[in-house]
Image (cartoon, grey):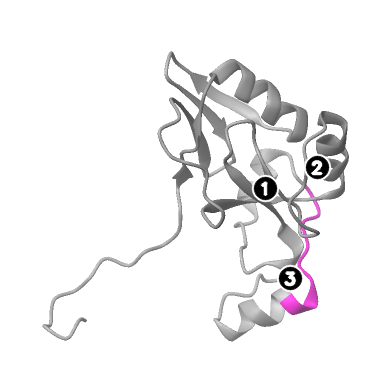
Amino acid sequence: MSAKGKKKARALGINHVVPEVGDLDTALKFYSAIFDFTLRGKGDHNAFIDLGDQFIQLSLGKTQETGDKRHFGFVVDDREPVRRALKELGAKTLDRRLNFRDPWGNRIEVVPYDDIQFAKAPHVPKGMGVHALKKTPNAIDELKKKGMAPEG
């Protein structure tokens, strides 16, 4: 309850992120060269990349200036294929942690699933065809502190 006694909605997570792009077909070609994903749908002004129980909506029309801090973290099972794909594309990484910009200046940070406080319910990766996702001891400890450690 808040100080005034009114219940607030509990933020539970992020359903989707909407990066702006200059061309949907070019964006899909760029992202599919880096990531294995399922295209949920595509219209004249939007394309939807399925991430299991979440998605990314690519939106046609770049209206924002490129920002240095504004970004989103893309969680992956293995960062090395991303690193190789970016090198093959000639895309410059911004740092060792694997931040890069897409052709429209959107900054993406590639985050390893095993070492973050983010856990998919077991049925979600299974439905995505992803197997053997594990967490590092550090990530498990962080999740335990919050009472959110995966079982097993």
Q: What separation in Å lies between label 2 and label 3 (alpha carbons)?
A: 29 Å
Expressed as whole percent of the image width and height from the top left, the position of residue 91 reads 77, 36
Return the residue at label 1.
125
Q: Is residue 86 left or right of residue 43?
A: right
Q: For the stretch drawn in magenta, what is the main secondary structure?
A: loop
Which label's residue is closer to the chain start, 1 or 3?
Answer: 1
Q: What separation in Å lies between label 1 and label 2 (alpha carbons)?
A: 19 Å
Which label's residue is closer to the chain start, 1 or 2?
Answer: 2
Q: Which mark is residue 152?
A: 3
Around disc 3, counting alpha carbons within 10 Å, would you say few (fewer than 14), some (14 to 19), or many (20 or more)? few
Expressed as whole percent of the image width and height from the top left, the position of residue 80 reads 87, 48
Q: Residue at x 56, y 51 (%)?
A: 72
Q: Amino acid at mark 3?
A: Gly
Q: Amino acid at mark 1?
A: Pro
Of tags 1 and 2, the one toward the viewer is: 2
Q: Are marks 1 and 2 in contact (CB under 8 Å)?
A: no
Q: Which mark is residue 82?
A: 2
Give the position of the N terminus as an image quadrant.
bottom left
Q: Which residues are magenta?
A: 131-138
